[in-house]
């Protein structure tokens, strides 16, 4: 229970932190780059040393770790932009309901079956994403105007990308990763994201499109430490949970959707339309069916 609560609270904090960054007018990308360097340093401290050894070169999981790093930095930016421009609830639902993509892919890759209520849950999940992302008719005073296309495209890209990332991690862990190399794989992804982000960020600094400010680094640290431990809690929760992984992940995602949505309403006064609220409620039902549908 401790690991589950830790994963839910820390991940919800990450989603809400992008609204705080917006209030302080800190650009998202530099904070995200410094966040990944912080993840690498935090992970190395927790494990007592930098976990990637020279022997990792040439291993089959290393290239997947680099691909994961690319997806990390792209998706984290998508989460940040979606949370800031459209809302935390939309970012949370689009991100966490992406679990249906690895579920569907597992049918084709690993000959698993999705029948009955689980199939109903997948249909509900798709409907939930659409409803949650439907723009409200009115816009809050002073809020940034976002086009209808942006309101639909950003959540869709986040949904698709998060699902593909989850599927990639699941595939690599089944095919290439052992307990001994799991942490190296994870830190490798963080390190790849940090290096790629740093190259792009340095170019932007040189072109004077952005100017380095200490608060960018501080924001990255404030995101990076919880980011690492949110994944640390998730991994430990999955190992300790009495439920199967297919049920444990939806339970975790359900908690994140609910807590982040509630936090956005309480702390940032985010307003949801009736359709948006229906979408969030449908997300709860969808995750329940995907997690426990086989037992119903």
Image (tube, helix red, strand yellow):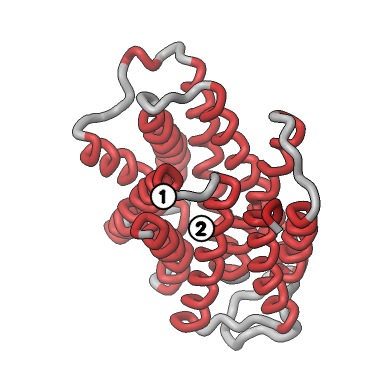
Q: Which mark is residue 237?
A: 1
Q: Position of residue 176 (x, y in %)?
A: 51, 21
Q: Which residue is mark 2?
A: 252
Dot 1 or dot 2: first in sequence order is 1
Q: Position of residue 7 (x, y in %)?
A: 41, 57
Dot 2 alpha-carbon crowd within 10 angstroms: few under 14, some 14 to 19, many 20 or more: many
Q: Report how far apart the C-alphas of labels 1 and 2 lie in the structure.
A: 9 Å
| Numbered-mark total | 2
**Local secondary structure at mark 1:** helix
Q: Dividing the image into 4 quarters, which one contains the N terminus?
A: bottom left
- In the image, taking residue 198 as reference, residue 80 lies left or right, namely right
**Looking at the picture, does residue 225 appear above or below residue 15?**
above
The answer to whether residue 239 shows anywhere in this view is yes
Q: Position of residue 237 (x, y in %)?
A: 41, 49
**Looking at the picture, does residue 129 appear above or below residue 70?**
below
**Looking at the picture, does residue 190 appear above or below residue 268?**
above
The answer to whether residue 199 shows anywhere in this view is no
Residue toward you, 178 or 63: 178
Whether the residues at callouts 1 and 2 have beta carbons within 8 Å, the answer is yes
- In the image, taking residue 10 as reference, residue 249 lies left or right, namely right
Dot 1 alpha-carbon crowd within 10 angstroms: few under 14, some 14 to 19, many 20 or more: many
Q: Residue at image x 50%, y 76%?
A: 264
Residue toward you, 193 or 285: 285
Q: Position of residue 146 (x, y in %)?
A: 68, 70
């Amino acid at each position: 229970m401790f690991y589950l609560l830790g994963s839910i609270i820390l991940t919800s904090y990450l989603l809400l932190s992008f609204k705080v960054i917006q209030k302080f007018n800190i650009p998202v990308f530099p904070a995200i780059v410094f966040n990944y360097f912080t993840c690498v340093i935090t992970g190395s401290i927790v494990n007592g040393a930098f976990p990637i050894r020279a022997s990792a070169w040439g291993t089959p999981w290393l290239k997947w770790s680099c691909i994961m790093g690319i997806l990390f930095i792209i998706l984290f930016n998508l989460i940040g932009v979606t949370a800031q421009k459209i809302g935390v609830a939309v970012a949370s639902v689009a991100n966490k309901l992406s679990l249906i993509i690895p579920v569907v892919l597992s049918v084709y890759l690993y000959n698993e079956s999705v029948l009955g209520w689980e199939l109903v849950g997948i249909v509900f999940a798709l409907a939930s994403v659409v409803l949650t992302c439907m723009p409200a008719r009115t816009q809050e005073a002073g809020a940034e105007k976002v086009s209808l296309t942006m309101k639909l495209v950003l959540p869709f890209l986040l949904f698709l990308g998060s699902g593909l990332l989850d599927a990639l991690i699941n595939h690599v862990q089944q095919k290439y990763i052992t307990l001994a190399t799991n942490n190296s794989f994870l830190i490798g992804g963080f390190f790849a994201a940090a290096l790629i982000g740093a190259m792009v960020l340095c170019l932007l600094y040189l072109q004077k499109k952005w100017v380095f400010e200490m608060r960018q680094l501080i924001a990255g640290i404030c995101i990076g430490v919880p980011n690492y431990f949110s994944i640390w809690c998730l991994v430990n929760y999955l190992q300790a949970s009495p439920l199967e992984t297919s049920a444990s992940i939806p339970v975790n995602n359900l908690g994140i959707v609910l807590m982040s949505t509630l936090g956005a309403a309480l702390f940032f006064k985010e307003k949801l339309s009736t359709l948006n609220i229906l979408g969030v409620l449908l997300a709860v039902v969808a995750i329940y069916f995907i997690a426990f549908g086989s037992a119903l």
